[in-house]
Amino acid sequence: MPEDNQPLQPSDEASAPPYRLPAESLQGKTIGHLSKQTSSHGRKLGCAAATVLIFTIAALFIYALLSKLIELPGEAVDKTAQIANQTKNVLVELFQLNPKIINNNTIVFEENQSITELAVISRKTQVSDEFEHSFLGSTKRIRVEGLFVIKAGFDLNEPFCAVIENNTVTLYMPPTRILSVEQKKVEVNELRNGIWNKILPEDLEERVNLLAALARQKMQTGGLDAEAHKFLLDSLSKRLGPEVIVRIKPSTKSAPAEQPAPKK
């Protein structure tokens, strides 16, 4: 028997604590589970935001495209009418030119032209000519030189008009041509008579008159008429601005399709 003065020792079965999972293990499992849930939820929100952004960008793009392609008829009419008025004012201001102007197959301005020629460019040129004639061993010689002013442009006795279509101005004009050859100065550099082959007054007159023809030919081969065409095109384009397309086409005997402007 045990001694009375010794305390009783609990048995191993009674003193063993109940089994529990370590707190660290439980805590780790809980954090991992929450982390997976948070990550999954974040991915879903990201996908939704990206989808909304894509649809928003697509909607804005479609709206911008439609706004460019679709134009109200009233706005288009106002725009072409504005271009027609601007074209008339620029032609009058720069060239004193008042052509018939057609907008959408309707005459909006009648021709009111008082001048018969439109000279848009002028150039000075100098030419010379030498003439020599021999008869029975007697030679006469003439050498002349002249300064001329050549003007190039359009003959307005032929049909001309301006046609407005959307943002395009087409000017139907006669072909460019040399309009005038103005003599400024003529010098006779040499007059030499033969012994019996004398210079006649008509000889000198013929050589002087030939100078004008030589000056005209020189400017034509030098491209003065093409320069006049380019000058009219560039001047009109510059004044109407980059948003308006300007073209020049040769006029024909039959004007473009047109209807009289409605009476107010």
Image (cartoon, rainbow, N blue to C red):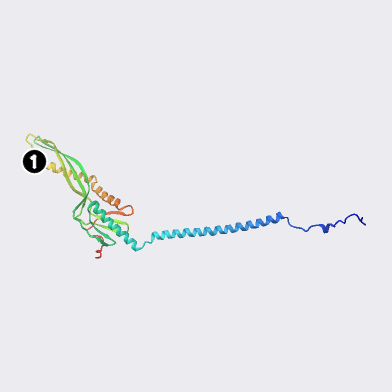
Picture coordinates of residue 182 (x, y %)?
Answer: 17, 45
Query: Within 10 Å of the Cα at label 1, are there few (<14), some (14-19), or many (20+) other Cα atoms?
Result: few
Picture coordinates of residue 158 (x, y %)?
Answer: 20, 56
Q: Is residue 80 visible?
A: yes
The image quadrant where one finds the N terminus is bottom right
Q: Is residue 220 above or below residue 16?
A: above
Q: Residue furthest left?
A: 196
Residue ID for mark 1: 201
Q: Secondary structure at mark 1?
A: helix
Q: Name the residue type under label 1.
A: Pro
State the image quarter where residue 217 is shown. top left
Please report the residue visible at 17 percent of the width from the left and 46 percent of the height from the top.
181
Q: Residue furthest right?
A: 1
Q: Residue furthest front?
A: 5
The front one of 65 and 15 is: 15
Side (left or right) of 30 relative to 73? right
The front one of 216 and 104 is: 104
State the image quarter where residue 78 is shown. bottom left
The front one of 204 and 173 is: 173
State the image quarter where residue 27 is shown. bottom right
Side (left or right) of 54 relative to 113? right
The image quadrant where one finds the C terminus is bottom left
Side (left or right) of 7 relative to 38? right
The front one of 184 and 146 is: 184
Picture coordinates of residue 139 (x, y %)?
Answer: 10, 35
Picture coordinates of residue 101 (x, y %)?
Answer: 25, 58
